[in-house]
Amino acid sequence: MSVHVIILAAGEGTRMRSGKPKVLQQVAGKPMVSWVLEAATGAAPERTMVVVGHEAEAIVAVLPQGVETVLQPQQLGTAHATALAVAALEPADDDTIVVLPGDAPLVTDDMVGQLVACHAGNAVTLVTTHLDDPGGYGRIVRGETGVEAIVEHGDAGPTELAITEVATSIYAFSAQHLKGALERIGSDNSQGEQYLTDAVGLAVGDGESVDAIEVDLPVVGVNSFDQLAEAADVMRARINSEWMRQGVMMLDPARTYVDASAVLSAGARIYPGVHIEGTSTIGAGAQVGPDTHVHDSSIGEDAVVRYSVLDGADVQSRANVGPYASLRPGAVLGPDSKAGSFVELKNTTLAAGAKVPHLSYIGDATVGEDANIGAGSITCNWDGYDKHHTKIGAGARIGSDTMLVAPVEIGEGGWTGAGSVISKDVAPGALGIERSPQKEIPGYADRRSKRAESDE
């Protein structure tokens, strides 16, 4: 006997009014269908089959190797989609078929494992939950012996609409029963579709065993952006709680947003308003935030990053960033370096101890150890056609408001005078200065005032 998983991911999700397929909408940095695939591992399946339809190629592109797909060219209902997958799987009668919706990111591998464990000997085992607002979901109709049927919202009468226990669209079927039921399910309902929920009523009518397990699932299927936000809120709480259990300090978890793919170290301190996305890593003792956006970036041990945006940056141990810094792709801050207030770095490496304290743009550059770049300095790295490199040697001192016209090199220990436009290399230990002689015009203020009066 084998277990197979079918994930239903063919729907268009018209209620979202989005050009993106519904199951590709992201929760904590992962498409919803990826969360469901992760949950499916709880069944230890021999094969996993995803039913695709709308924007099939985009969905297939995010599926991991080994996951199979079958196309539902017309969305004729969940039973029709399941039938296509069963035909492709060709399961033995004593196999178990687990069916999961592709838009249920909050389902966990523990839930699926519990479902399979409770299924032995049943024709159908389903997962249910209670919702304060069950609108839109199929209602669980129970009798003296247990579940008798699932009534879809559009077909429910006043009695069924008052029921708060709903179907989650998560099932385990005996393959033998499922194959027989799919042949008998019609489309005589308000939607004109073939409902997989009808397989439950057919099993009851045939006198076969039907069981249900109740779980706490605050958001079942995601059909709108408000439900997506609810699911993201629940997932964020799960992720943050796990990191805090592992020793990460979050001052306000409700205002801390961490993608599932990010990695945090014990001892890190995360302030409110922080978004940590993609492949980002946060080292032990690092302080991040408030109000900081970190995407595909690393922040090393004991580094401090405040009120800043990092995208593809590498901030190493004890470096200091912000407030209001922008670190763009290729920015590397070595140990004990600094990118201070209103500093932008792009494709630039600051060696250990190098500092760009404030109000500067440094792009396509390497800055040596312990060099210091004065306020308002800029690397003029683009000539209108190509980018060029600036090299600043160890221990160099760049005066405030220096324009470094690349390609250019400041040697070790070199200086530039404040307000200079440096377009030629500066030798090690030398001072590069470029200024027009200062002129003074005596009596100018009085003459200018009289001229203004005469113009009135």
Image (cartoon, helix red, strand yellow):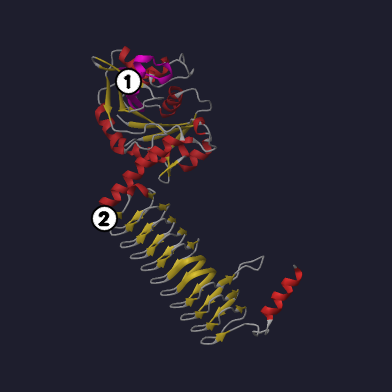
- Residue shown at the point (49%, 62%) measured from the top left: 326
Residue sitting farthest toward the bottom: 430
* Residue 163 numbered tag: 1
Residue sitting farthest toward the right: 455
- Residue shown at the point (69%, 75%) measured from the top left: 449
In the image: residue 151, left or right of residue 15 = left
In the image: residue 153, left or right of residue 267 = right
Residue placed most toward the observer, 106 or 437: 437
Image coordinates of residue 11 in percent, x first then y, are: 48, 30
In the rendered structure, does residue 257 fall within the stretch colored magenta?
no
Image coordinates of residue 174 in percent, x first then y, are: 32, 23
In the image: residue 423, left or right of residue 222 = right
- Residue shown at the point (62%, 67%) measured from the top left: 382
Write down the quadrant of residue 363 in the picture: bottom right
In the image, the segment drawn in magenta is: 148-176
Identify residue type, mark 1: Ile
Circle 2 SS class = loop
Circle 1 SS class = loop
In this view, 331 is above or below 200:
below
**Quadrant of the frame with the N terminus:** top left
Binning the other alpha carbons within 10 Å of mark 2 as few (below 14), some (14 to 19) or many (20 upward) gives: some
| Dots 2, 1 in contact, CB < 8 A | no
Residue placed most toward the observer, 255 or 237: 255
* Residue 247 numbered tag: 2
Write down the quadrant of residue 421 in the picture: bottom right
Image coordinates of residue 120 in percent, x first then y, are: 25, 26
Identify residue type, mark 2: Gly
In the rendered structure, does residue 152 fall within the stretch colored magenta?
yes
In the image: residue 345, left or right of residue 145 = right
* Residue 101 numbered tag: none
Image coordinates of residue 244 in percent, x first then y, are: 28, 51
Binning the other alpha carbons within 10 Å of mark 1 as few (below 14), some (14 to 19) or many (20 upward) gives: many
